[in-house]
Image (cartoon, rainbow, N blue to C red):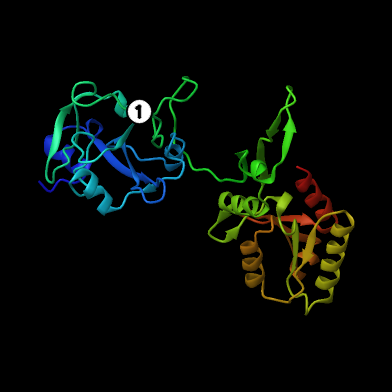
Amino acid sequence: PGKAKCEDVAQLLGMPLERTVKSIVLATEGPAGEPAQIWLLLLRGDHDLNEIKASKVPGLAEFRFATEAEIVATFGTPPGYLGPIGAKAPIRVVADRTVANMSDFVCGANERDYHLTGVNWGRDLPEPVVADLRNVVEGDASPDGKGRLAICRGIEVGHVFMLGTRYSAAMNATFLDENGKTQPMQMGCYGIGVTRIVGAAIEQNYDERGIIWPAAIAPFEVVVCPVGYDRSEAVKAEADRIHAELLAAGVDAILDDRGERPGVMFADWELIGVPHRVVVGDRGLKEGQVEYQGRRDAEASRVAVADIVGHVRKLLAN
């Protein structure tokens, strides 16, 4: 009593969740004026329905989930105690492959507060229509039979869709086959999303300070940060020269000429994620040096003023 979930039933009976069967009720609309066709999809208690797979079952291309009123009218009980045995109205039963191979399983008895144990195909109910209905889980056998599946995070950057004849038939886009007969074209589409590439790059390249762009798609490859640009003629002149020389060398560089304090400049460009930074300051210039720091580098390094452009170009080439 009161055990409406597979997990609760398995715990009560002291058996693995894998021995239970969950019932999912779908409906498809029939001709106008006729009641909807009710379908009962059966999955192992620890598995979840894959709606795309379900839509590929013949007759379920345009399914919806049944309402509670339809469920009560068909099974005589509310959800939580549903099963393939003893429905009050005709149903179509489709079992996932794993369920079709089960024996002595537990399912709802179509009566509130009751479940059936020891249920077997062929003895207690007819053999079902069998289909692949569930989401894969960690440890499932791989399709090529050479190992086990692992569940990993992914990012959809590109896609391929098989459209079939859905649009070609509507547009009367046809061809003549080898027998001279008119056939609708088989269509597909594919593409790479520009904005998806941006999102994927950021998801894989960032830290607590901001983005870390790969140089190939960074908004700028190098930022020149002069300390005291609005106060020191020497700093301004050298920063302008380095910036101009980088541009002339084909490097996508930007000069921060705002005259901001170093901390503000650095924080802004780390947030934006420019992969290479050159810092020009009075103190360094007196020693003939500037500071270079890659976005992933923990510390800055000193580079001779005369060598900085070549140093950056070498890094970009690598």
Q: Along the line of sight, which residue is nearer the eye, 35 or 318?
A: 35
Image spot of residue 315 (x, y percent): 75, 47
Q: Which residue is mark 1?
A: 129
Q: Is residue 19 positioned above or below 258 on the image?
A: above
Residue 173 rendering spot, x and y as whole percentages: 72, 41
Residue 90 vs 263, above or below: the answer is above
In the current view of this chain or complex, which residue is farthest to the right? Answer: 248
Q: Residue at x 40, y 28 (%)?
A: 140
Report the amino acid beneath label 1. Answer: Val
Secondary structure of residue under mark 1? strand
Residue 84, x across and y down, in percent: 23, 34
How many labels were placed on the picture?
A: 1
The residue positioned 16% from the left and 40% from the top of the image is 9
Query: Looking at this view, is 46 or 251 the one in front?
Result: 46
In screen coordinates, is 196 left or right of 3? Answer: right
Residue 273: x %, y % from top left: 65, 59
